Amino acid sequence: MSNQRFEYASVEWLWDSSNLRCNLPNGEEFTRTGTYGEVVTMLTELGSEGWEVASCVANSNWLYWTLKRVIY
């Protein structure tokens, strides 16, 4: 069994209103306005900080990603 520990974050996108929201485990929340390009930019920025997509769900105008990264 692995001793790795993870922390989790979320990214939510309401694509019809171009609203993006990210919630990090330290309580930080930030929002942006954006379409496809901004979603890619946000996920790329988070990826450079060690975050990776663990899951994604979608419904109607809404997409929600759960991200995780290893805690060292």
Image: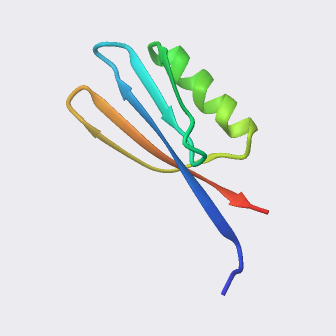
Measured from the top left, where is residue 54 in percent x and y?
A: 51, 53
Measured from the top left, where is residue 35 in percent x and y?
A: 44, 14
Nearer the observer, 29 or 55: 29
Q: Is residue 37 above or below residue 66?
A: above
Measured from the top left, where is residue 70 in percent x and y?
A: 70, 60
What residue sits 67% from the left and 69% below the top? 5
Outermost residue on the front side: it is 27
Measured from the top left, where is residue 43 in percent x and y?
A: 59, 32
Name the quadrant of the C terminus: bottom right
Using residue 40 as the reference point, say whether residue 4 is left or right of it. right
Using residue 45 as the reference point, say whether residue 18 is left or right of it. left
Nearer the observer, 57 or 27: 27
Outermost residue on the right side: it is 72
* Colour scheme: rainbow
Name the quadrant of the N terminus: bottom right
What residue sits 60% from the left and 57% below the top? 7
What residue sits 57% from the left and 48% below the top? 25
What residue sits 74% from the left and 40% below the top? 49
